[in-house]
Amino acid sequence: MAYSEEEVQKLNGRKTILNCSTTDPNKILPMKYNWAREFYKTGIANNWTPDEVNMQKDVEMWMDPKALTEDERRLVMWNMGFFSTAESLTANNLVLSVYKHVTNPECRQYLLRQAFEEAIHTDTFIYCCDTLGLDPDEVYSMYEKIPSIKAKDDFVIDLTKSILDPNFSTEGTENMQKFVYDLVGFYVIMEGIFFYAGFAMMLSMLRQNKMIGVGEQFQFILRDESVHLDFGVHLINTIVEENPEIWTPEFKKSLRDNIIKSVELEIAYAEDCLPRGILGLNMETVGQYVKHIADRRLERINLEKEYGVENPFPWMSEIIDLKKEKNFFETRVTEYQSGGMLEW
Ligand code: MN
Ligand code: FE
């Protein structure tokens, strides 16, 4: 028999995201955090795999020495180098630390879906290496050898050190702050800022009909990542709502400072990807885009914005919004045929 309204309220009244010893993590019903369930369904509706994307034109372009400039090749390689390892770094953080401490079953259901999507993203870069004949040794060591990539990864790894400690628990104000600080590091900084200069650069190439298969893969990843970010924001804001004592002026300042620091790293990365600019894209504009999205991220977690700059790439929002399309996979072929890359 279904739960009565009264029973649901009684059971859910005791549920919290963190430190909830009164509910069983194996009992997902009745649900309290319906948003987590919605994110799960959105993830399922956006299902894709990299081998659905045809790479023939990319292979031809990549092999033709005259089809791309040195700078365009550098842009592609630097993004391969960052994303190929960033995806597994994200997956590891998710499974080894977020999943451990977020015991709420409806959130965990989404975390499992997200982890699967990170596996798909990891697979995407395997597929790109295979089809384009890239040297895996080169691609997978760029996060250690290219300073602007290493700086971003080190920044995220550093953030997560304290909670990866096997003795870490989220009990107490200070530990909850550590955990939220870490969630901001994964979701807002890694998935919400560090991925976005790359998305903008690769999708700008796609708009010019260059490396369209890779561009389409990045478009799918962007769609997934924007949902991951949205879930992360809900998770962070709900934890703060349930534990208002953690939201002190000092704590807010530490989060804000960290986001601002990450913007500097992301801009340094963009400059390194794009030292001389390419057609339709220069690092100043990419930098402005990073600042614009950082403001949006700050506002979403109820922090004051920093930069106040306009979005130089309004077409990026259009791509992100496409995720609301239910039958995305049925429509995308005609969209490409009739729309043309430059008209997004
Ligand atoms: Mn991902
Ligand atoms: Fe992600």
Image (spheres, rainbow, N blue to C red):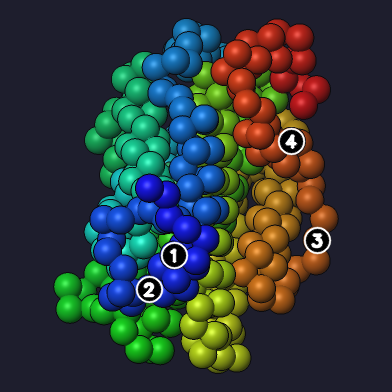
Front tag of 4 and 2: 2
Q: Quadrant of residue 98?
A: bottom left
Q: Are marks 4 and 2 in contact (CB under 8 Å)?
A: no
Ligand 2 within 8 angstroms of badge 1 C-beta:
no
Percent position of residue 258, x then y: 53, 74
**Residue picked out by circle 1:** 7
The mark that comes first in sequence, 2 or 1, is 1
- Check disc 1 and give the amino acid type: Glu
Q: Camera-side residue: 322 or 307?
A: 322
Total tally of numbered discs in the picture: 4
Give the foreground label among 3 and 2: 2
Badge 3: few (under 14), some or many (20 or more) residues near its Cα, within 10 Å? few
Mark 2, residue position = 18
**Disc 2, SS:** loop
Circle nearer the viewer, 1 or 3: 1
Residue type, mark 2 in image: Leu
User: Which residue is rendered at x = 49% and y = 87% of the image?
Assistant: 246
**Contact between labelled residues 4 and 3, with CB atoms less than 8 Å apart:** no
The residue pinned by badge 3 equals 309
Residue indicated by mark 4: 318
- Ligand 1 shows up in the quarter that is top left
Hey, what amino acid is under mark 3?
A: Val
In the image, what residue type sits under mark 4?
Answer: Glu
Q: Is residue 286 visible?
A: yes
